[in-house]
Image (cartoon, rainbow, N blue to C red):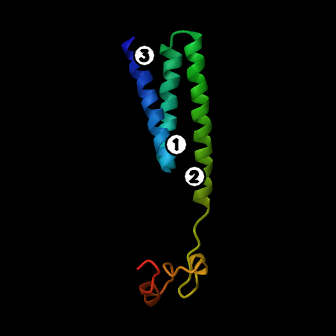
Amino acid sequence: MASTSTNLQKAIDLASKAAQEDKAGNYEEALQLYQHAVQYFLHVVKYEAQGDKAKQSIRAKCTEYLDRAEKLKEYLKKKEKKPQKPVKEGQPSPADEKGCHCYRATKCEMERCCWS
């Protein structure tokens, strides 16, 4: 029985850490943690869980975590495909249009930054 609680606790800890990383915006780390948590949960269901109700509960959580992992994977894939366009020197950036000079390309303009 000790191994059941050890593996189950490991799965719970991983899922909890995944949720924390997800909330903090660390999506790559969250994705990895969700995937590892699901692996542990599935191991518990297959080899250790006692009773259909426990298995059903764990499977439901696995579905939630897998759904979130899929969404994160899609988001990261889209983010990877969208390279940021560099601003050419001397050309105003989107921030300039808002009245901020922080992102201008030349040094003299940066010295007049609205944040300094």
Whether label 1 touches label 2, CB < 8 Å: yes
Q: Residue at x 50, y 29 (%)?
A: 39
How far, Cα to Cα, is label 3 from label 1? 24 Å
Answer left or right for 36 relative to 76.
left
Q: CA distance from mark 2 to mark 3?
A: 34 Å
- Sequence order check, earlier mark of 2 and 3: 3
Amino acid type indicated by mark 1: Leu
Residue to which mark 3 is pinned: 4
Q: Is residue 108 visible?
A: yes
Q: Residues within 10 Å of mark 1 (few under 14, many from 20)?
A: many
73, 95: nearer the viewer:
95
x, y (%) of residue 42? 53, 24
Q: Position of residue 32 (x, y in %)?
A: 48, 41
Q: Which amino acid type is shown beneath numbered disc 3?
A: Thr
Q: Which quadrant of the view contains residue 108? A: bottom left
Q: Earlier in the sequence, mark 1 or mark 2?
A: 1
N-terminal of the pair, mark 3 or mark 1, is 3
The residue at which mark 1 appears reads as: 31
Q: Secondary structure at mark 2?
A: helix
The residue that disc 2 covers is 76
Residue visible at 44% across and 86% down? Answer: 112
The vertical placement of 54 against 106, above or below, is above
For numbered disc 1, what is the local secondary structure? helix
Which residue is at 57% across, 52% downward? 76
Tell me the kind of residue under disc 2: Leu
Marks 2 & 3, CB-CB < 8 Å contact? no
State whether residue 96 is above or below residue 39.
below
| Whether residue 38 is situated above or below residue 111 in the rendered picture | above
